[in-house]
Image: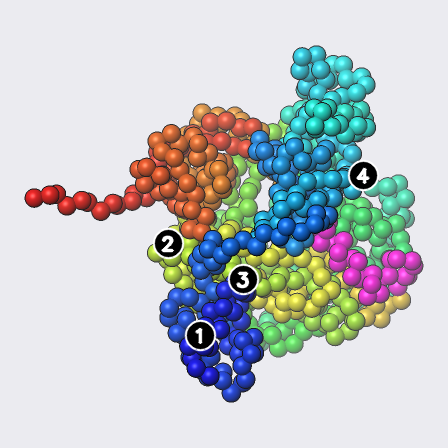
Amino acid sequence: MDKNIIKESLVKFFKKHGNQSYTAFQCVSSIGLRKTEQADVQSVLNELVQELFIEKIGKKYSLRSDFIEEIVEKEEPALKEKEAKTVTGTFDATSLAKNMSFAYVIMDDGIDIKISAEDTLNAYHRDIVEVELIKNKANRRIGIIKRIIERYSNKFVGTVDYVSKKKLFICDNLKIHNPFQISGAADNLKGKKVVIEIDNWGNRLMNQLPSGKIVEVLGDSGLPEVELLAVIRDFDLPLEFPEEVLKEALAIDGKITEADIAKRSDFRDIFTFTIDPISAKDFDDAISLEELGEGKLRLYVHIADLAHYIKLDGEIFKEALNRGNSYYFPKKVLPMLPEALSNKMCSLRPDEEKMTVTVITDFDNNGAIISQDIKESVICSNARLSYEEVDLLFEDKEHGLDENIVKTLNLMRFLSQQLYKKRVQKGYLSFDLPEVEYIFDDEGYLVDLKRSQETDSHRLIENFMLVANEFVAKRLTKLTGTTIYRIHEEPNNEDLMKIKDILKFHKISFQVDENINKTWQNVLKCLPTEEYHRVFDRMVLRSMKKAKYSTAHIAHFGLGIPTYTHFTSPIRRLCDLIVHFQLKKYEFHKALDEVGKNDLSSAAVFNYAGIATKKEALADESERAMEDKTLLAFMKKKVGDEFTGIIIAFTNSAMVIELDDLPVRGIVKYMSLTDDFYELYERLKVVKGRRRGRVFKLADKVEVSVDMVTDDIYFSLKCEAVTKVHKKKRKKKK
């Protein structure tokens, strides 16, 4: 076939399927050609790459992102004046909470529906609503809410206020975008944190506010313990264990008999210890390392044997299903399991004999795995170490550890470094994402914040746990029909192209590899400074899909592991506990009590994976809500203070600044910049002044002062350390 015809066909094809990528062979079949014409198609594809119309990533071709935008702008929007169509989605009031005149209904297909404020009926954030589509053009939809199908909640947490003798309730969740009237008694409650139950949802068109009764008074707003309780109530988290659960936990006999030991591998004489945060109370993993000669090493990863004590048909397991995981807040943990198990009976505390499940791995002198096995075991930990004291050793500082521990730790560090190198070779993505470390006074008030860097001690534990988790995932894949995997799907090619365009603007380039993991590694490696890592590491992470639990056998992209699960934390994660039960049944051939819905059938395991994913998201959201409260309260004391920081992101209305001295983020509204009118160029993540041409870009250094702290932290720009735009000088007329 004539190459011009092939070229015309390919151009039309890529314009039509701009958001997808295809191999050369797929292109051949998609435009109706035979295999014998693949060489001609390949030649034309190469031409289109050189003409910068398409891009090649690995073995796949796709339309360049700038062409996609150009096509969307130029093409005539297909206005579909069809009959009104009714759909169902989730109401999102984020924009209403920011005093905008519209909201959205979030749809599963990714094309959300815009709703004018007057057309939102009396919907509130996260309600399930029925929407009538009134316009549907290209990728934009506009609709009217016709009915509230299901309320997200009828209970809210907030503060009582009195305005013109009216008793009003101001919700802590600012996305509940208007106050509620309080019906019934509310005297002497101004400033109190309360729980309200809605009995009338009001009418927005008639300016009638919703109303409800106070069902619980939590205490004075602003007190740390009250604010924590408010988050727990707001997310409906389980604060106390049911009485029947506590009774069952107390009835468990935790004594280890000689008969128990005889049925297990006895590792009590092997030198063993735990490494955890200094504040940890539950220790579900311990490690040992032996030298085998000729440079060979044997690693033991011992995990608390929760499944030995918990029954599938018991009250403890039912409550574990309800909780899904432990919830970690500053100075407070809501455990998945009763403390009699999590902090005592099953916790691998030093100098106490404990039931464990041990993964044993032999390595050669290059850190390659020779063999692996798994055993029911009994151990006796020799020491409880913290990350902090192990890092003192690794940093050649005064540490106070005895010689046996020092020798073992140095050997472990050597093995960990070998394992890390192999992980990177397989595609492991290493992000520089410091966590926030909170420092409190004796009364629970936040007094300081620090960035907590990942250290060699953290990496050591992570590398050893990855070895155990990967082995167990492979084992259960062979033994079971269905197991739970920890999966992380590959990112889209379009996300890579967006980041490539932004980095190109910053004069930063990276090599594209046929292996997509290697390509993303190159993205992270190409960043020249710490400031760029602070910006782009999070941008890369956000561009990827979120890891989750699934019975689908899909690789974990970020780790570069084809078969992976969570096995090493059964005290605090539901997935790990289920995996332990599966090991009991399929690996160790134990008879398990399987009653009703609590079994290990494929359907049940699928359900457990869904619960684990859902509860993990709940934990993330509730923990983030508490962190936000804590940070806002801390920064209110900093109003007027000046800081340096960098620009880490742009929104439609503001630039996001991360401070250098504190792990805190706030915003500078464009409208607060009075020297010009600033516009966002979304594709390149750049803000430019319309008249003077001043440019703000990612990773720019700025000086700010804390202007106001309300729903967010608002900064004023003090020193506009920005990129200058050089305009061409006009030639003087002679």
Q: Secondary structure at mark 4?
A: loop
Lower position in the chain sequence, tag 4 or tag 3: 3
* Residue annotated with mark 2: 505
- Please report contact status of discs 3 and 1: CB closer than 8 Å, yes or no: no
Tag 4: Cα neighbours inside 10 Å, few (<14), some, or many (≥20)?
Answer: few
Residue 155 badge: none
Depth check: 494 or 266 in front? 494
Query: In the image, which is nearer the foreground, mark 4 or mark 2?
Result: 2
Query: In the image, which is nearer the foreground, mark 3 or mark 1?
Result: 1
Q: Hey, which quadrant is residue 331 in on the image?
A: top right
Q: Residue 418, percent across and down?
A: 52, 68
* Residue annotated with mark 4: 240
Lower position in the chain sequence, tag 1 or tag 2: 1
Q: CA distance from mark 3 to mark 1?
A: 19 Å
Q: CA distance from mark 4 to mark 2?
A: 53 Å
Specify whether 74 is left or right of 181.
Answer: left
- Residue range of the region highlighted in magenta in the rendering: 592-616
Identified at 42% across, 77% down, the residue is: 4
Query: In the image, which is nearer the foreground, mark 1 or mark 4?
Result: 1
Magenta region, mostly helix, strand or loop?
helix
